[in-house]
Amino acid sequence: MRPWFALALLLCACPTEKTSPEKSADPAPPADPIAATVTAAMDTNADPCNDFYRYACGGWVDNSVIPGDQSRWSRSFSVIRESNQTLLEEILKQSAAEPGEDPGQQLLGAYFGSCMDTDAIDAAGFAPLQADLKAAAAVKSLDDLMTVAGTQQSHSGAAVLFDGGVFADFEDPGLNIMHLGQGGLGLPDRDYYLKTDAESLALLTDYEANVVRFLVLAGTETDTALAEATAIVAFEAKVAAIQLPRAELRDPQKTYHRLERAGLQELTPSLNWDLYWAAAGNAELTAINVSVPTYFSALETLIAETVASEGGIDTLRSYLRWHIVKASAPRLNAPFRDAHFEFFKTRLAGQKEQKPRWKQCVDATQSSLGELLGQAYVDRRFSGESKPTAVAMIEDIVDAFATALPELEWMDEETRARAVEKARALDHKIGYPDEWKDYSELNLAGGWFGNARAADSFETARQLAKVGNPVDKGEWFMPPSAVNAYYNPLFGEIVFPAGILQPPFFSADFPPAMNYGSIGMVMGHELSHGFDDSGRKFDAEGRMREWWAPEVAARYEERAACVEEQYNGYELREGMAVNGKLTLGENIADIAGIKQAHQAWRSSGLQDPAAASIVSGVTNDQLFFLAFAQGWCSLATPEIEQMLLTVDSHSPALFRVNGPLVNYPGFAEAYSCAAGTRFAPEQRCEIW
């Protein structure tokens, strides 16, 4: 059961005539080590007024390679994560070697240690899955199907048929409810099944071959596995065909249908939800939102048609077995791990090598015991001075947002006042929770598979127990070591874990221009999610309601359409276009975030924008934008680029830098870009 809201952390794509802006001489080799890192990343032969991403990141791009165990690599997120992982490994190795008397340290050590014991994992083979596979093979009716589906979604993470998560009600944000949504696919998105170009069909063929490989590993004869895999992929294609496109799911008003348990049963009368919820672990659960009712009604029809067809119940049994094996493969012996890696990491994402086992186990422990591990991480990596500095920056950015609102002619006074109220009401969570999650009821089973299952079951039970109860606004949805940030519309909060408050995003040693340009932009981005095309539909209390005057809302939509059209015009390479609708919210937040961070820095009075910075030949104003852009310097395999264009609500790094700067006059001013050039166009998209 996974949380619903996206956890987030940027126009014209046509070439323009290169111009020579009025700027200082190229930076000289710096003596300052911070300045050295900035200049090393740059390509000063590029024209900042034609391609600022290349100007800021070209040196880094030319001199960097994607490590074999990664599918993408960035100057910021990846470097920080690598550093964090090294520290977390030290913590976990010590916990495993010297667990002591502390229950938390014992839990960390046992969990990590069992993950690292590949000899025991390999010796077990796929024996840990036998009970699950036996239950799937015994399915003879729809009632059996619902029982197995409930068990697997709760305890193995196999999202068969549909998916769900527990979080606040859109219209009653003080209450936790269950949200059910689309799911049930083995590939990342419906589009993988529905596209008919040669490359997509080839990938689908390779996917089917991978299903065969897994089924054979799980004991199925090859001829039988070939037939089963064909039936499984054909069934998943039918599931994909009844799903809404990913971009359509971004509108909360279109995904809120509080049907309750009785309404869900009425919508799908042949599916026994009593059996499902009992198997999942909360037989009394009643508070339910069904995000896409048309999907569930069509799914019921599809299941009924499948059962009625010759061999249909066999297809459903095979489908269940496949998803059980796929979900558990990374926790099984080497043949299963290799089969999973070679398709889902190499074929889909272009990753050449498996991560070292220690990294896999750090990731697994962080995922399951994130706040327990986070306590030790914070002690070592998050200094006491960081929090007040970050809070002060956020307050500056909120002030900049509020100060700029009177300049927006498209807003009326009443809506403007409500926007200020919402911005100032946002809660700011920095670093780590005030109260840590309690893991005392988690009892590990001994071996790695059993321990991982125990952690899954523990978290599922915790989530299901929240349904129908008040929300805990102190809860965090990322561990402290996460290199990320998010906006939660239902809590009315922006959250910055300690993991992202590290160089090159943030440092007490950085000049203010760099901190405001890098982490300040992230802060402005998260704040702006409260006012993007989705977040704007929630009021200051986190309730989904229309708090805009109708004519103002209409003018907002016109401006959002400008941004959507702008990003629709971007292609990463031929045939790989950005989906302006899917990425609209993130693009709006990027455009607004850079403006707010820049204006907050200029208003802070901490530095003279026009004065020389630590980088020779670069003003502080220019350094601000360099720090912003260099946070997004990235490399990616073609495979992961294609996947992200399909499933990711964020634009590629190139457009996260160049896209917002096209729309912000402050950048053209800082780099003296001539009117009519790429970053000083006659018309810009502006919302906030």
Image (tube, grey):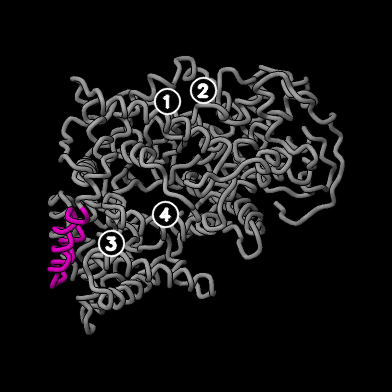
Residue 23 lies in quadrant: top right
Count neighbours of disc 1 (C-alpha within 10 A) and say few if under 14, some if 14 to 19, many if 20 or more: many
Question: First in sequence: mark 2 or mark 1?
Answer: 2
What kind of element bears circle 2?
helix
Q: What mark, if any, has residue 253 been given in the picture?
A: 4
Report if the CB atoms under discs 1 and 4 are less than 8 Å apart: no
Q: Residue at x 61, y 21 (%)?
A: 510
Label 1 vs label 3, nearer the camera: 3
First to last magenta residue range = 125-151
Count neighbours of disc 2 (C-alpha within 10 A) and say few if under 14, some if 14 to 19, many if 20 or more: many
Q: Is residue 180 visible?
A: no
Residue 445 lies in quadrant: top left
Q: Residue at x 60, y 51 (%)?
A: 560
| Residue underneath mark 3 | 323
| Residue underneath mark 1 | 431
Image position, residue 279 (x, y; %): 14, 55
Question: First in sequence: mark 2 or mark 4?
Answer: 4
Identity, as a three-letter code, of the amino acid under mark 3:
His
> Residue 379 lies in magenta, yes or no?
no
